[in-house]
Amino acid sequence: GSSRGVRVCSAQCNAAEGSGAMAALTGFPYGVVEAIAEHLGLLDVLPFGATSLEMHWIAAKTAGDAANYAFNGVLPAAYLRLGPREPPDWLKFLMALQPRCLVRGNRKVWPDQTRPLPFVLDTTGPWFVEFKLAAAGAPNGTPTIGLIDAGCPDTTSGEGGRHWPGDLSRRGTERFAISLAPYDGTVLAARPGSPTRCRARLRWEKIGDEQRKWNDPMSCGFLIENRKLKFFRDGGGGAWHSGETVCEDLPKQVSPCMFMSSYVGFALVQYVCLWNSLPETCPHCDANFQGFAEPWDSWN
């Protein structure tokens, strides 16, 4: 079925509008109000906190419990802050999962980098991480999307936010990393303890030409389930298709990332949303995209 589940990207809460109605509940016994709050959605319960101190504590507890239940398997980044203060758990989830632009602009030389999203995922899943990506005027390929072992050392803060120097999916490191170039289905991977990298290409037709002056953003993403990884993209007209399973033994926790290496030209990579189900595909058409056009091979 179509993706429905964990999607806090577009959710909004109008506390001012809801607080008037919630104020009428202040006369009810504490246990009654708490029971009502527990049956509301995460964002619906927040207007409670604007009515009184007692309601604030009910709302905070209920929102925290709801967030921990809804986002079980998601770990927001520890560096998320509201100024000098550490936000409550429910707000950390909303901050971490909001849509964000990882890179946008046109440069003659982009720094090689691995830029993570501000959350970690348990690879039991299921989780589908959705992106939009565009490349243009780019003679050296495209940015890529993928993930790294969440056990990587801390990121470096710098221009554009937190990142690791270099494309970790293109060089041997102490941590697993894998990425996809969605235009042509090239997959790159680096495994711990291996000085060589691996490369394969999915059985996908090439879509677009990154060397053109402009390409519309493409929807793409990946599914994590039972420690397995499968990439997806929009093949046109909103019709998603998947590719072959590219990994069957993911680390227990991973960080979704955007990667760049020797990149020149216009780049746009946006994180769109986290789902707890895969996008809708045509089972008959999707079978045509399974397998590899080029199998895994070492790449120095």
Image: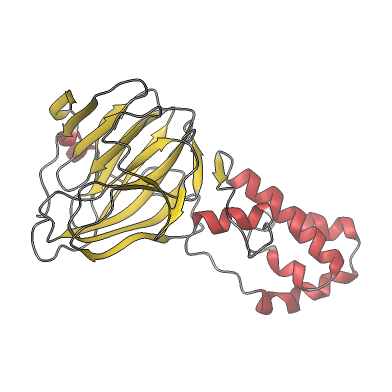
Residue 1 appearing in the image: no
Residue 155 appearing in the image: yes
Task: Tell me: residue 221, above or below residue 36.
Answer: above
Q: Depth check: 115 or 25 in front? A: 115
Residue 62: which quarter of the image?
Answer: bottom right
User: What coloring was used for the rendering?
Assistant: secondary structure
Please give left or right for residue 114 compared with residue 208 in the image.
right
Residue 204, percent across and down?
A: 14, 40
Q: Depth check: 275 or 160 in front? A: 160
Residue 74, percent across and down?
A: 54, 42
Can you say which quadrant of the picture contains the N terminus?
A: top left
Please report the residue visible at 89 percent of the width from the left and 59 percent of the height from the top. Answer: 30
Residue 225, percent across and down?
A: 42, 32
Residue lying farthest to the top in this orientation: 193
Can you say which quadrant of the picture contains the C terminus?
A: top left
Task: Tell me: residue 249, above or below residue 28.
Answer: above
Please give left or right for residue 38 compared with residue 3 in the image.
right
Residue 185: which quarter of the image?
Answer: top left
Task: Tell me: residue 211, above or below residue 194.
Answer: below
Residue 127: which quarter of the image?
Answer: top left
Residue 267, percent across and down?
A: 24, 60
Please give left or right for residue 120 compared with residue 219 in the image.
right
Please report the residue visible at 32 percent of the width from the left and 27 percent of the height from the top. Answer: 247
Please report the residue visible at 65 percent of the width from the left and 45 percent of the height from the top. Answer: 68
Q: Depth check: 271 or 273 in front? A: 271
